[in-house]
Image (cartoon, grey):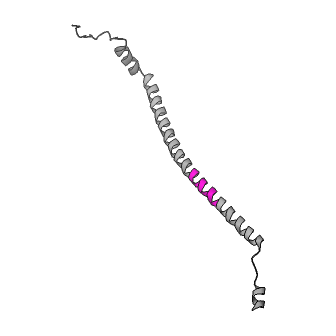
Amino acid sequence: MARRQRNRVKPKKGMWIVVLVTVVICGALLYGMLKLESKQKALAAEQVRLEMSIEQAKDKSKELDEQKSYMQTDEYVEEVAREKLGMVKDDEILFRPEDK
């Protein structure tokens, strides 16, 4: 029996150090992976928000282009002359309500 116990290989300290270092490295990698995953989700949400903002800016730009085109027409000039300047055509009569 004594011989059998002597033939058993005892784990060396170096082997435990390698196992411990491997576990620490795996833990660090797992932590880094989780941190990157949460950052990826935040960036994806930011991307969606920015894409919506771009679409709104495109819509606003289109509206402004349409308004610019309308403001260059004779119809707009006539509308402004009538509403803001109180002008009328030669063959028109302007009726105003009496002030009480």
* Front residue of 76 and 35: 35
**Residue 22, image quadrant:** bottom right
**In the picture shown, does residue 13 fall above or below 87?**
below
Indicate the position of residue 38 as horizontal and vertical percent values.
56, 52
**The N terminus: image quadrant:** bottom right
In the displayed structure, would residue 10 be above or below residue 96?
Answer: below
**Which residue occupies 52% across, 47% down?**
45
**Would residue 47 be found to the left or right of residue 85 on screen?**
right
Describe residue 14's horizontal placement relative to residue 59 as left or right: right
For this rendering, which residue is in front, 36 or 12? 12
Residue 12, compared with residue 28, is above or below; it is below
In which quadrant is the C terminus drawn? top left
Tell me the residue at 71%/69% (across/down). 19
Q: Which residues are magenta?
A: 29-39
The quarter of the picture where residue 86 lies is top left
Above or below for 69 versus 86: below
Magenta stretch, overall SS: helix
| Whole-percent x, y for residue 85 in the image | 37, 11
Point 60% across, 54% down: residue: 35
**Side of 18 where 34 appears, left or right:** left
Residue extending furthest front? 2
Q: Is residue 33 magenta?
A: yes
The mark tally for this picture is: 0
Is residue 74 covered in magenta?
A: no
Find residue 37 and report its horizontal and vertical position in percent.
Answer: 58, 55
Residue 31 occupies which quadrant of the picture? bottom right
Name the residue: 52% across, 42% down: 50
Q: Position of residue 7 (x, y in %)?
A: 78, 86
> 53 or 81, which lies in front?
53
